[in-house]
């Protein structure tokens, strides 16, 4: 099943997608909903960020080759994380599929993508074992954890390096029927494949993260957990289009433009 | 003017307080509202967290004596932050005035309060100068940035050290008519004064933080910015009551209990 959130005229609603057709629902998959008689063609609506999360979680470093690459960038020895310590991103930075990633005037050339699997929480959950952890997940979408590396190295927090407005493309929709432990992820920059990895190489998988988190935190419907990226990342420049494709989900595509 | 959010029976609403009387409003101070004829006595309602923020910002280290104390705790030389780099906390951890702070079973004795001024954003804002920064603030409330110091030192992020459920008391209400640059803050643990400082000693004041943030981030109605605490902090134990009083706003009071 595929859930989207869309705008048609002045109206925003959640919808169930079948191919290029959207059946509008009243309510949302996060509370209760009823299917309406209203149908829309995908090309006649604007897809929105599929959910605005109450809390926006992000694993950060969670793939071995990305750890190695990031350590080399900082001139340090790679150290794999020993625990599933979750981090945070901020909703102000979210944009939908197709919207512009705006490169700030004062950003450097080290302006980079990170393509990621995103777990979308569907129900309130606390104290889940690893085996039952995925039972609270509604489905999966795709995120691009856009990062300005000089700010990431120099600032005390990731506030502007990772949370400047437009730095968090998420979408295009939520797919409920995929296995998060074995999804091929392909990142393309203006058509050229720049990264390819499988979600099976995560250091701590989605179930482990959610189980660990739920020991201390209540997870709420609509919360999202971004699961990290693998490998090296390259610079994006205005004029580029960055696409993150995850098999079984779809493709998140966003142009890069310069700030006015 | 004093804004609260409250529950009376099954109903939750925003209200305007005059002394111990609450005038219920329809809508909210963050969008539009109309005053109703419904009045409530403060002791007949439950005060709720005054706002659930779309994004929950926190300055972290923002007072000189707290920097010195925290550095000593880590065996390092104190280094004052050079820029107003904002951090994040998470809404799952919010509790209202009077609700229990739950000390987790596996937490250590280093379980501590941090009393803080909280700025509540009232309107959408971007690119504000320092002079105009406070124009986007609806008012101020009080926060207790409860922290488990061994997790704070040992984990890769502050996820459970500062964002375990119940670790973020906020309230009791939002006061619109105070000057954030000169507010005496008093923290009491079971009646004993354990810390006293003035918000005028912040390293970067509220206006500076908001102005710097708004260069990169759009601030939204309901966002909160926790402004940090000063000085050393002490351990809390189950049975304690932690009170944070800020002159002109009120007192945020929460009992500490052990996890079942």
Image: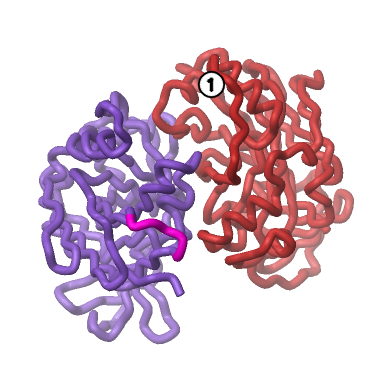
Chain colours: A red, B purple
Q: Assess whether residue A35 is covered by the magenta stretch.
A: no
The image quadrant of residue A70 is top right
Which residue appears at 40% of the width and 86% of the height? B9
Q: Position of residue B14 (x, y in %)?
A: 34, 70
Q: Position of residue A183 (x, y in %)?
A: 83, 41
Q: Which residue is mark 1?
A: A149
Q: Pointer 1: residues within 10 angstroms few (<14), some, or many (20+)?
A: many
Does B201 appear above or below A53? above
Q: Position of residue B234 (x, y in %)?
A: 23, 54
- Relative horizontal placement of residue A149, taking residue A231 as reference (left or right): left
Let me know if residue A8 appears in the view.
no
Give, as a single range, the part of the protein colored magenta.
Answer: B105-109
Which residue appears at 40% of the width and 45% of the height? B152
Seen from the viewer's position, the closer of residues B247 and B161 is B161
- Relative horizontal placement of residue A218, taking residue B104 as reference (left or right): right
Does B88 appear above or below A242? below
């Amino acid at each position: 099943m595929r859930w989207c959130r869309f705008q048609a005229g002045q109206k925003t609603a959640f919808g169930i997608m079948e191919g290029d057709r959207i059946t509008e629902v009243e309510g949302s998959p996060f509370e209760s909903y009823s299917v309406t008689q209203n149908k829309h063609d995908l090309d006649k609506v604007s897809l929105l960020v599929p959910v605005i999360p109450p809390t926006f979680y992000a694993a950060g470093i969670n793939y071995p080759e990305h750890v190695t690459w990031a350590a080399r960038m900082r001139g340090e020895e790679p150290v794999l994380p020993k625990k599933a310590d979750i981090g945070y991103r901020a909703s102000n930075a979210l944009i939908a599929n197709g919207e512009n990633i705006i490169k700030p005037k004062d950003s450097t050339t080290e302006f980079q993508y990170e393509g990621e699997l995103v777990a979308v929480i569907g129900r309130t959950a606390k104290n889940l074992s690893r085996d039952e952890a995925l039972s609270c997940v509604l489905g999966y979408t795709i995120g691009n954890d856009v990062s300005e590396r000089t700010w990431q190295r120099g600032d005390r927090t990731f506030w502007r390096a990772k949370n400047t407005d437009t730095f968090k493309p998420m979408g295009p929709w939520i797919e409920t029927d995929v296995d998060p432990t074995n999804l091929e992820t392909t990142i393309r920059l203006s058509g050229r494949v720049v990264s390819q990895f499988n979600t099976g190489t995560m250091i701590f998988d989605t179930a482990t993260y959610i189980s660990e988190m739920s020991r201390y935190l209540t997870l709420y419907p609509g919360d999202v957990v971004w699961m990290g990226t693998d490998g090296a990342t390259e610079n994006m420049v205005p004029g580029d289009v960055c696409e993150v494709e995850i098999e079984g989900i779809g493709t998140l595509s966003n142009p890069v433009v310069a700030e006015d």
